[in-house]
Amino acid sequence: MKFVDEAYIDIIAGDGGNGCVSFRHEKYKEFGGPNGGDGGRGGHVFAVADAALNTLVDYRFSKRYEAKRGQHGMGSDMFGAAGDDIILKMPVGTLLIDAETNDVLYELLTPGEVIMIAKGGDGGFGNMRFKSAINRAPRQKTPGWPGDRKNLKLELKVLADVGLLGMPNAGKSTLISAISNARPKIADYPFTTLHPNLGVVRVAAEQSFVVADVPGLIEGAAEGAGLGHQFLRHLQRTRLLLHMVDLAPFDDAVDPVAQAKAIVLELKKYDPALYAKPRWLVLNKLDMVPAEERAARVKDFVKRFKYKGPVFEISALNREGCEGLVRAVFDHLQAQFKSTQVEEAPDPRFAVAPTDTPAPDHA
């Protein structure tokens, strides 16, 4: 199925039903009076975050969603029925943006979360509402109120703990397939990855994290070159970036340091907040470097790249070094969780299992 992370839709809530003008007329019944009921409210439009969805493709082809209007009021004090509501299922991580002002109106972050994105109009008043001691036969009524109408832009940002960053053919898809349950397409040509892939990395029982692999970046990505710029938004919610570098390119004229610096520059141009996220260096394809040259090549790269953070030397193809990388990532996420658990809702994936400690001896 084609990955779609952007769509435009029109949302129309139902109008309220009109009020009714009616009088009680029954043979042999005295004191007939106004008995026109109110109109029913129009149908609301709701959005619900569905964890089973991962694309907005349904909204690419169906663009108009209109709830039914409320039923008109009737005589005999009968109110009109409310219009049926509409529930739109969307992937977790969807932003609902006003297409005209570009303001973010809603954000679906929690599975099962439900929000009202368009309110149905209230029903109009029937003439029974207007009766009084001095107005015993009112003929007034009011029409139903119109429902909300909105033009929305839907934008999906996948929810992942860790994002993979790098040039095409840096080995991101190979890594995510080696450490997680994701099975992306892998080939020996650039831009094999055409849409984001998510993988769940299992560290232990009930301990895991989610990794996002996006299409590779090239120089000029922030201005629209290549494919990766279209999906950089999916890295904005991550808590850690893994910058993967091909340390053994096929072309000897390609300088891995220059490529790595170009990626960092594009990241900074696209979003300073994304650039400021914790970013670790992952040097890949060491299986293609002679064993006696590895240490020198890694040392030369780190020195010329002027990088002072954590460095991981791996071969995603044969899983060399992957286990240590996974453990370090989980420990980092767990430390972040400990520092923010007062402000955020607890995440059981990073909770530390209690240890059995002996009771103190008071004797």
Image: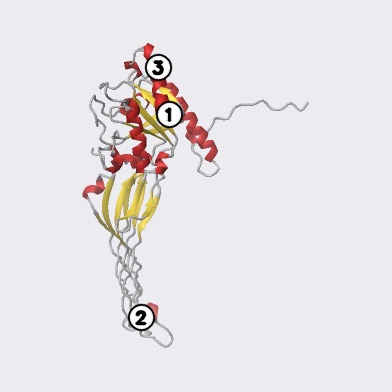
Looking at the rendered structure, which numbered label has been put on residue 34? 2
Instruction: Give the image location of residue 123, x and y in percent.
Output: 34, 69
Q: Name the kind of residue labelled 1 in the image.
A: Lys
Of circles 3 and 2, the one toward us is 3
Residue 237 appears in the figure: no
Instruction: Give the image location of residue 275, x and y in percent.
Output: 40, 39
Q: Residue furthest bottom?
A: 134
Q: CA distance from mark 1 to mark 2?
A: 85 Å
Q: CA distance from mark 3 to mark 2?
A: 95 Å
Q: How many marks?
A: 3
Q: Categorize mark 2 by other alpha carbons within 10 Å: few (<14), some (14-19), many (20+).
A: many
Q: Secondary structure at mark 2?
A: loop
Residue drawn at the location 40% of the way across and 48% of the way down: 113
Q: Name the kind of residue labelled 3 in the image.
A: Ala
Q: Is residue 225 above or below residue 173?
A: below
Q: Secondary structure at mark 1?
A: loop
Residue drawn at the location 28% of the way across and 46% of the way down: 6
Q: Secondary structure at mark 3?
A: helix
Query: In which quadrant of the rendered view does residue 139 lie?
Result: bottom left
Q: Is tag 3's residue or tag 1's residue first in the polypeptide sequence? A: 3
Q: Residue furthest top?
A: 292
Q: Is tag 3's residue or tag 2's residue first in the polypeptide sequence? A: 2
Looking at the rendered structure, which numbered label has been put on residue 296? 3
Q: CA distance from mark 3 to mark 1?
A: 15 Å
Q: Nearer the viewer, residue 139 or 280?
A: 280
Of circles 1 and 2, the one toward us is 1
Q: Which residue is mark 1?
A: 306
